[in-house]
Image (spheres, rainbow, N blue to C red):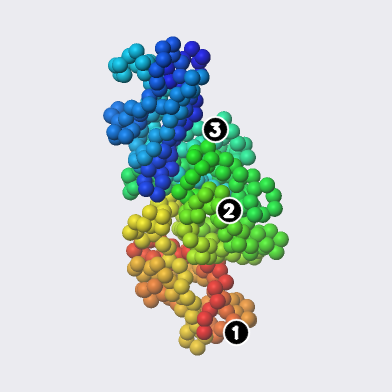
Amino acid sequence: MSDNQVGAIIENGPSDWQIIQQDAGGFGALIVGGRWVSDPKGKVELRLAFEESGTSVNHALDWQAARTTADGKWSATLAKIPAGGLYRLETRFRPDVQTNGEWSPRGDMRHFLGVGDLWIIAGQSNSAGYGRAPVNDPPELGLHLFRNNEQWALATHPMNDSTDTKHPVNREGANSGHSPYLQFARLLKQQLNHPIGLIQASLGGSPLSAWNPTQPGDAALYKNMLHCAELCGGRAKGVLWYQGESDTGGEKLKDALTYEARFTQAVAAWREALRNPDLAVITVQLNRVYGVSGIDGDTGWSVVREAQRQVARKVKAVAVVPTFDLALTDCIHNNSPSNLLLGERMARAALGMVYGKAVDWKAPDLKSARVAAAGREVELTFDNVTSRMDGLDPTANSFRVEDEAGMVPMEKVLYPQDARVRLLFSRPLKGRAVVHGAYGLNPAMVPLDMERFLPMLGFHGVPVES
C-alpha cells in the first residue's frame, strides 16, 4: 500500500471475491479495520452495497461510523448481512468540516463479496482434479475459490493449481486438471440462491493418515486444511472427500481393514477442530482401477469400499455416492465428463442430507442377503430403489459368494424387476457364507436403479442370513 494514500485504508478484513460462511439464521458478519490519513479531523464511514446496482443492502448496512482512535486507527463490524450477494464493501473518510458525504475523501473498497456456504475440498488425486478431456464447465459469479496462493478468486479449473502457492505441502507434481467441484457448487447455488465458496486443500496420492491427527505422524494435510479454513473465517458447511486409493493395501491389508475406524476418527477430529459437530462430509466410494492385479488388491479395494459404505450408515451427516458407471481418463482417474456427473451426485447428496431438499439422492444399498431354494440361491434386497434393480449387460456378474468350502460357483444372476437381485448357484451353500458386491479392482457392470440410472454401492463380506 502506498504511503501517500489518503482517506480510509483497509488493512484487515475481507478480500475481493471472498465468501463468508453464513450462520444458522442465514446471516454473515464482517470485521473490518485499518487506518485513516487526513489533515482535518473527522470519522471513517463504511457500508455494504449490491455490486450490480450500488444501492445499500439494507438500512442497517448503509453508511455508518466506524470506531476511530487518536493514533489514526479505525475498526467496525457489519453484522446481520443476509445470505446472498454479490456485495461491495465501501469506506470513506468524512471530515467534520464537510457535510456532503458523496464527495468525502476516498476510502478503500472490497469487491465481489458473498455470504453463503463454504465447502472444503480434501482427499487425494480425484479430489485434486486429475480429469482430462475438454468439457464445458465454465466459471460463474457466485462460485468462488480460495486458491493455494491464499487468495480468493473466481472458481475455475484446475482448482489445485500451485501457482504462487503459500503451502507447498499440497503442491502437485504435475499440473492438475478437471474436478467435480465447480459443478457441485453450481448446482447448490442454483437451488439455494446464495454463493458457494470452495477451499482447496487436497493432494494426489495422500493417505488417510495425512488427514487424521489421531494417527502417528504430523498429519500435515489436516493441519494445512485447518490453516486454510482459519484464513477463510474458521467455519465451513462441509468437507468434500474423495480418498481411499492409497489405503487399500498395507501389510496384511492393515490400512484397508482399519479404514472404517480411522476415517470415523478423522471426521470427529475435523468437526472438533472446525467447531461444528454437524459438519457435513460428502464422500465418494472408490471407482474401478485398471492395470493392477492380485487377490490382495481385489480384497483391499473392496474392503475400503465397504468401510466407506459403513461410515455413511453409522456416522451422522456423512453421505457416500457411487462411481462404478464413471469412465476413466487413465487407469485410475475419472475423466472430465464423469466428473460433471459426480459433481451432480455430490450436490444432490448435499441438497438432500444437508439442506433438507426433497431429492432422491441415495444410491441403492444392500439391505439384506438371505438363503433361498434349499441353499442354491441367495436373494439380495436393496434399499433406496425408486424403480427396479436391473443390469444393462445380462451376462455381467459383479457378485461373489464365499462359504466354508470356498468360492461358490454361480450359474446366473436374475432381476425380478423390483428391489431384489437373485443369485443362483450350481451347488448348495455349505455353512457360513458371505456375499460381496462389485468385488475387486475392476468389477463387472453393476446393477442400477434403472429409472434414476444410479448404480448400487459396492459392499464386502456381508453375512448371508438363513
Q: Quadrant of residue 306?
A: bottom right
Q: Would residue 46 be found to the left or right of residue 280 on screen?
A: left
Q: Alpha-carbon distance for marks 1 and 3?
A: 59 Å
Q: Residues within 10 Å of mark 2 (few under 14, many from 20)?
A: some
CB within 8 Å, label 2 to label 3: no
| Residue annotated with mark 1 | 431
| Residue annotated with mark 2 | 269
User: Which circle, 1 or 3, is nearer the viewer?
Assistant: 3
The residue type indicated by label 3 comes to Asn
Tell me if residue 444 comes above or below residue 158 in the rendering: below
Horizontal and vertical percent for residue 250? 68, 59
Q: Along the polypeptide, which appears first: circle 2 or circle 1?
A: 2
The residue type indicated by label 1 comes to Gly
Horizontal and vertical percent for residue 281? 49, 54
User: Which circle, 2 or 3, is nearer the viewer?
Assistant: 2
Horizontal and vertical percent for residue 235? 49, 45
**Number of marks:** 3
**Observer-nearest of 315 and 445:** 315
User: Which circle, 2 or 1, is nearer the viewer?
Assistant: 2
Residue at (49% x, 40% y) in the render: 233
Q: Along the polypeptide, which appears first: circle 2 or circle 3?
A: 3
| Residue annotated with mark 3 | 149
Residue at (64% x, 48% y) in the render: 219
Q: Residues within 10 Å of mark 1 (few under 14, many from 20)?
A: few
Residue at (44% x, 13% y) in the render: 38
Q: Would residue 452 be found to the left or right of residue 146 on screen?
A: left
Q: Alpha-carbon distance for marks 2 and 3?
A: 26 Å
**Observer-nearest of 459 and 408:** 459
Residue at (49% x, 19% y) in the render: 70
**Observer-nearest of 319 and 394:** 319
The residue type indicated by label 2 comes to Ala
